Amino acid sequence: MVWVAPLLLVALILVAGGLWAVRLSRPSPEAQIGEAVQRMSGQLDVLRVSHYTSEVVEDGQVKMEPEYQAALEDLARARQEWRAIRGQVPEGQAQPVDEGLEKLDASLRSRRPPEEVDRQVGELIRSLQGLSPSS
């Protein structure tokens, strides 16, 4: 019985220390957003430079199906990253990204000209680069 109180104290200290260590190891919201923006920007750059070009889509026709499908997958990965951080971003900053992703999706699926998609990707990347966490 004499050992119960000290054992409970030690257990409490270990639990508190573990929670503190977990909290320290979790990236800050700024870091989470920054890392996600970097990954999203990379995916979107690959989309416009490699997977959605005039060699892939011309006059609304897909000429290279594997690359076209890769472009859709690039966008899907960017959207997945966005869903992971969206709740940490103020609504005023999130809305242009939401709209940009929707517009880009519609353009890809309707096989808009690569020049138009390239411009949209540039606008979307600029919106992403201005993100900061909610206060």
Image (spheres, rainbow, N blue to C red):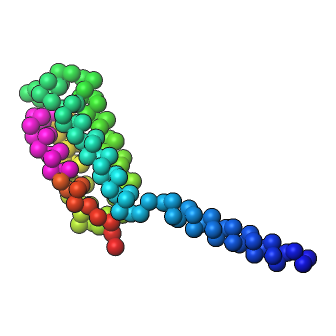
Indicate left or right for 46 with 3 as reference. Answer: left
- Residue 112 seen anywhere in this rendered image of the structure: yes
Identify the residue at image location x=15%, y=30%: 53
Q: Position of residue 47 (x, y in %)?
A: 23, 36
Q: Nearer the viewer, residue 105 or 6?
A: 6
Q: Position of residue 108 (x, y in %)?
A: 20, 37
Q: Is residue 124 above or below residue 130?
A: above
- Residue 82 seen anywhere in this rendered image of the structure: no
Of the 4 image quadrants, the one containing the N terminus is bottom right
Residue 117, image quadrant: top left
Q: Is residue 19 magenta?
A: no
Q: Position of residue 19 (x, y in %)?
A: 60, 66
Indicate left or right for 122 with 89 as reference. Answer: left
Residue 51, image quadrant: top left
Q: Is residue 54 above or below residue 47?
A: above
Identify the residue at image location x=34%, y=58%: 33
Where are the magenta residues, as a range? Answer: 111-125
Q: Nearer the viewer, residue 124 or 32?
A: 32
Q: Is residue 94 above or below residue 67?
A: below
Q: Position of residue 129 (x, y in %)?
A: 23, 56
Of the 4 image quadrants, the one containing the C terminus is bottom left
Q: Residue at the far top: name it.
A: 63
Q: Is residue 121 magenta?
A: yes
